[in-house]
Amino acid sequence: MVTMEVRRYVLSAAWSSAREAAEKFGGTIREFFVEALRDAWAAALASKTEKTVTIDAVSHDYNSRGRGETMYGYVAKPDGKGGYLPLVRADQLDGAIILSRAAYLGDGYNRSNARTSSTTVEVTLPVGTIAKDYYRSNDRHHCSETRIHVLTATGWERAEFIGNKRDDGKWLTVVEVSGRRIELA
């Protein structure tokens, strides 16, 4: 049985695809809609519309003086209208199962009382979900980088992080997925 959420997702994908085709090749959106709808349904049925995945939800890094940072993984689900719902911390998603809470001593710092810990969750998400997390290198500079991934039928694929943008008093994350810029609240 196909849920209403899946139908909305397929219709919004079809309209988006038809709009892009009309811009690219000329003509009206209606001329391209039927074929775009066929393609969207074929893609939805060929691939699962939901996938169970594991996500690194929380990571804590502390040095020997107790200074450090906590980094969270965030998820934005498709809203079914061609956009995305606001970012949510991965450890606070409905239905998320906490798989592990691990702590490691002396990881990468060469100090016996430095520590890191992480929390991993398992959750079922719709295909098209965007995940935002941070990668912390273990080199001597301990740099972190924002990473963006998109959930596909085969798993997570890397997407491009453009930057952060301030708009009407709140910060937005700007990413590029399949050549389309998306602003995530």
Image (cartoon, grey):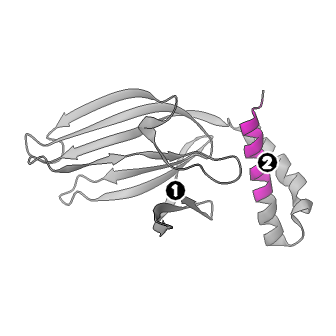
Q: For residue 172: magenta?
A: no
Q: Secondary structure at mark 2?
A: helix
Q: Is residue 65 left or right of residue 36?
A: left
Residue 55 visible? The answer is no
Mark 2: amino acid: Leu
Residue 11 marker: 2
Q: For residue 15: magenta?
A: yes
Q: Residues within 10 Å of mark 1 (few under 14, many from 20)?
A: some
Q: Residue at x 63, y 47 (%)?
A: 78
Residue at the limit of the structure toward the right, as seen here: 31
Residue 161 screen position, x and y as percent: 48, 62
Residue 180 screen position, x and y as percent: 63, 64
Residue 133 screen position, x and y as percent: 41, 50
Residue 55 screen position, x and y as percent: 44, 38
Magenta-highlighted residues: 2-16
Q: Is residue 61 left or right of residue 149?
A: left
From the image, give the main secondary structure of the stretch colored magenta: helix
In the depicted view, which residue is nearer to us: 93 or 38?
Answer: 93
Q: Residue at x 63, y 40 (%)?
A: 153
In the depicted view, which residue is nearer to us: 96 or 44?
Answer: 96
Q: Is residue 97 left or right of residue 180?
A: left
Residue 185 marker: 1
Q: Is residue 44 above or below residue 123?
A: below
Quadrant assignment, res 42: top right
Q: CA distance from mark 2 to mark 1?
A: 23 Å
